[in-house]
Amino acid sequence: MTPAVTQRGALLARELVVPAIMLAGAGLYWTDASNLSAEAQAFPLALTALLLLLLTAIVGRAVHQWHQGERPREQADEDHPADVMRFAELKRWTIVLLPVALILVWQHTGAAVAIFLYALLVLIMLGERRLLRLALIPACLAIGLTYLFKTVLYLRLPDAAWLPGTWL
C-alpha cells in the first residue's frame, strides 16, 4: 500500500470516529427504547437518521476524492506547517474534553448555564470575536436545548443551586 493510500485511510478513519461513536450510543439507546412513546422516540430517530446521513456523506466524499486522485485534505505541507497542525489537533481535543470540566460543575451551575458556558467557550476556541454572536448563539442554544430536554422530552436536568425554583 502506498503512503498516500495509507494517509487517506487514516484521515477517513479519523473523520468517522465521532459519528460512529454517536451512532453506537444511539444504538444503545434503541436497545432500551422499544417500549417508549412515539414522542420520546422522535428525537433519537432523527439523530440516528442524521448520523447515518453524515457517515454516508463522509464516506462518499472520500470515495469521490479517491477516484478523482485528489490529495488528502489535511496533509501537512508548506501551507500547513507541523506546529499549526499540532495546534489544530490541540483545539479539537480541548473542544472534545471541555464537557468533562462542565460536567464536574453541572450540579452547581445548572444545565442551562453549563450549556451556555460550553457553547461560549467553543465559539471562543473557534476564533469568534463578534460580541453579538458570542452572546446570542450560546444563549439561544442554552434556552433551546434546556426547553427541549426539560419540557418536550421531560428529562430531569439540574437547576442552578443558586436560583430559586425552576426558571424554564
Image (spheres, helix red, strand yellow):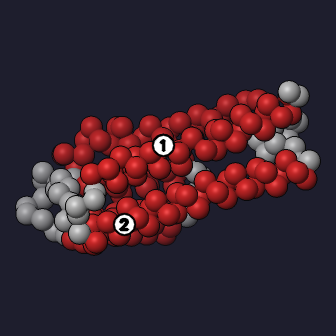
The extreme right residue here reads 69
Residue 150 spot, x, y in % from top left: 22, 65
Above or below, comparing residue 31 to residue 112 in the picture: above
The residue at which mark 1 appears reads as: 21
At a point 55% along the width and 58% down the height, the residue shown is 52
Is disc 1 placed on a helix, strand or loop? helix
At a point 19% along the width and 65% down the height, the residue shown is 154
Residue 68 in view, yes or no: yes
Above or below, comparing residue 153 to residue 103 in the picture: below
Name which residue type carries label 2: Phe
Is disc 2 placed on a helix, strand or loop? helix
31 displayed left or right of 108: right
State the image quarter where residue 60 is shown: bottom right
Name which residue type carries label 1: Ile
Residue 135 spot, x, y in % from top left: 43, 65
The earlier-in-sequence mark between 1 and 2 is: 1
At a point 50% along the width and 38% down the height, the residue shown is 94
Q: What distance separates the C-alpha of mark 1 from that of mark 2? A: 17 Å
Q: Quadrant of the C terminus?
A: bottom left
At a point 52% along the width and 57% down the height, the residue shown is 51
41 displayed left or right of 133: left
Residue 16 spot, x, y in % from top left: 61, 44
Mark 1 surroundings: few (<14), some (14-19) or many (≥20) residues within 10 A: few
Relative depth, front residue between 111 and 41: 41
The residue at which mark 2 appears reads as: 43
